[in-house]
Image (tube, helix red, strand yellow):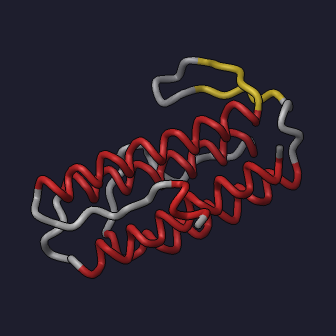
Amino acid sequence: MKEFFKELFAYGHHSNQRLWEAMMENRGIVPEKSIKLFNHILNAHQIWNTRIDQKDAAFGVWESREISGEKEIDQQNYTNTLTILDIYELESVVQYTNSTGKAFTNSVREILFHLVNHSTYHRGQIASDFRQNSLEPLVSDYIKFKR
């Protein structure tokens, strides 16, 4: 199962890196909504990693930054997740508080699966936003990644 998660996160990382490149190629015309969603994908990934590691998050969930530095943040998130997969058992329990201060408990497996779905969902929103703004959306289907 850990190998499958590593594959899923390789897919997500690959998609994020390609999306960053598309945003940089279209700098100046990328919709603000797309930039905000991309920041959110990376922020949430970092936040969930820090919840598993019991560390403080560096970013707020909707914090915005310039797109130029996001490639490195995505790389850090990916590297940290691979380390988490090497260190923690998937059924390890994580206690954390969400952004509103409410306490929850989930397994590492549940959190990582959520992260994969969360990122895919928002990349789909970005693809729709690109199309609505006359930009060619990135094809980021998992099956295309596997071909």
Q: Position of residue 83 (x, y in %)?
A: 79, 59
Q: Residue at x 75, y 35 (%)?
A: 109
Q: Residue at x 28, y 54 (%)?
A: 127
State the image quarter where residue 115 is shown.
top right
* Quadrant (top left, top right, bottom left, bottom right) of the N terminus: top right
Relative placement, left or right, of 46 versus 40 is: right
Q: Position of residue 64 (x, y in %)?
A: 32, 56
Q: Residue at x 42, y 74 (%)?
A: 69
Residue lying at the far front in this picture: please name it.
Answer: 147
Asked if 106 appears above or below 74 in the picture, the reply is: above
Q: Position of residue 114 (x, y in %)?
A: 59, 35
Q: Residue at x 38, y 51 (%)?
A: 123
Q: Nearer the viewer, residue 16 or 11?
A: 11
* Quadrant (top left, top right, bottom left, bottom right) of the C terminus: bottom right
Q: Nearer the viewer, residue 107 or 18?
A: 18
Q: Nearer the viewer, residue 96 or 119?
A: 119
Asked if 91 appears above or below 105 in the picture, the reply is: below
Q: Position of residue 55 (x, y in %)?
A: 69, 46
State the image quarter where residue 28 is shown.
bottom left
